[in-house]
Image: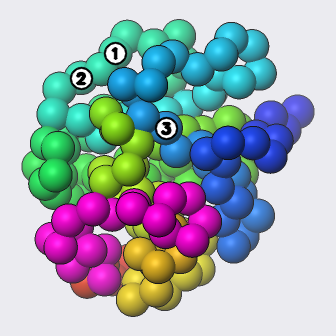
Amino acid sequence: MTKTWDDGPSIVELPDGRRIRGRGLRHGRPPDGDQQPEFGVYLLGKDPGPFEWEHRWVRWPDFRLPSSPDDAVEALREAHRRAADQRVEIACGGGVGRTGTGLAVVAILSGVPAGEAVAWVRQAYNPRAVETPWQRRWVRGLDLEL
């Protein structure tokens, strides 16, 4: 049975119809039941676990780029793939910079051109998403095989 997100706060609908929730972990745990993700990608300087659901941690210090860009892209590819039939979230501490950058990568995987992904995620998720110049450059420079 498909268990994707309904419309709601912080739910981003990608161009391919998949839905992913962006979230800031400092804003508390998600509600129980059908508001909990089935899979999460957490973009933080240290492992945020444990969680009651499957997750991947990507070492990504605040206001920076991921320690391993390849690991980040692999985790975000998995999030995009799973979002076809699961509730998936991408989160960092505040839910803006790293989360927005992750959502921009997933938007590219969904068909948004890399040069337009930052503007797209700012319109679809948060006007301040992808906070730093180096995060914006990283997203624009991605050449992902779809």
State the quadrant of the N terminus: top right
**Which of the 4 image quarters holds residue 97?**
bottom left
**Per the image, is 126 magenta?**
yes
Judging by the rendered image, the residue that carries numbered circle 2 is: 47
Q: Amino acid at mark 3?
A: Arg
Please report contact status of discs 3 and 1: CB closer than 8 Å, yes or no. no
Q: Measuring from the top left, give residue 105's x and y in whole percent.
A: 42, 66
Q: Residue furthest right?
A: 1
What type is the residue that disc 1 sits on?
Answer: Gly
Q: Is mark 2 in CB contact (under 8 Å) with mark 1?
A: yes
Q: Answer yes or no: do the residues labelled 2 and 3 have beta carbons within 8 Å? A: no
Residue 22 lies, in percent from the top left, at: 52, 44
State the residue position of label 3: 23
C-alpha gap between disc 2 and disc 1: 6 Å
Placement of 42 over or under 104, stated as above or below: above
Segment colored magenta: 122-140
Measuring 20% from the left and 65% from the top, which residue is drawn there?
132
Residue 85 horizontal/vertical position (percent):
75, 44
| Residue 76 against residue 28 in the figure, above or below | below
- Tell me if 48 is positioned left or right of 40 in this view: left
Instruction: Residue at 26%, 74% (x, y): give it.
Output: 136
| Colour convention of the picture | rainbow
The amino acid type of the residue labelled 2 equals: Asp
Indicate whether residue 113 is drawn in magenta: no
User: Which residue reaches farthest front?
Assistant: 127
**Which residue is located at x 37 percent, y 25 percent?**
26
Residue 121 image point, x, y percent:
51, 68
Instruction: Identify the residue under disc 1.
Output: 49
The dot on residue 117 is none
Mark 3 vs mark 1, foreground winner is 3
